[in-house]
Amino acid sequence: MLKDGQPIRAIDRHFNVGVATIDRIKRKTELS
């Protein structure tokens, strides 16, 4: 399907960033 491992790594990186952002928003919402 995908050539090389770069596309997978790029998607994984974006996914991790998204999870971290959501976690921040959740924490801010809980504190407020």
Image: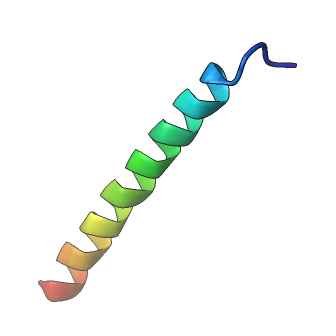
Residue 15 coordinates in the image, percent (x, y)? 51, 45
Task: Locate residue 7 relative to residue 1 in the image: left or right.
Answer: left
Task: Locate residue 22 relative to residue 10 in the image: left or right.
Answer: left
Residue 26 coordinates in the image, percent (x, y)? 31, 73
Give me the residue at 69% from left, 24% from top. Answer: 5
Q: Is residue 19 above or below residue 5?
A: below
Task: Locate residue 4 relative to residue 31 in the image: left or right.
Answer: right
Residue at the far bottom: name it.
31
The image's colouring method is rainbow
Residue 30 coordinates in the image, percent (x, y)? 24, 85
Give me the residue at 78% from left, 13% from top. Answer: 3
Residue at the far right: name it.
1
Dividing the picture into quadrants, the one containing residue 9 is top right
Image label count: 0
Give me the residue at 63% from left, 22% from top. Answer: 7
Residue at the far left: name it.
32
Dividing the picture into quadrants, the one containing residue 20 is bottom left
The one of 9 and 32 positioned closer to us in this rendering: 9
Task: Locate residue 32 relative to residue 12 in the image: left or right.
Answer: left
Dividing the picture into quadrants, the one containing residue 1 is top right
Q: Is residue 18 above or below residue 27?
A: above
Give me the residue at 32% from left, 55% from top. Answer: 21
Quadrant position of the C terminus in the picture: bottom left
The one of 23 and 9 positioned closer to us in this rendering: 9
Q: Is residue 15 above or below residue 32?
A: above
Residue at the far top: name it.
3
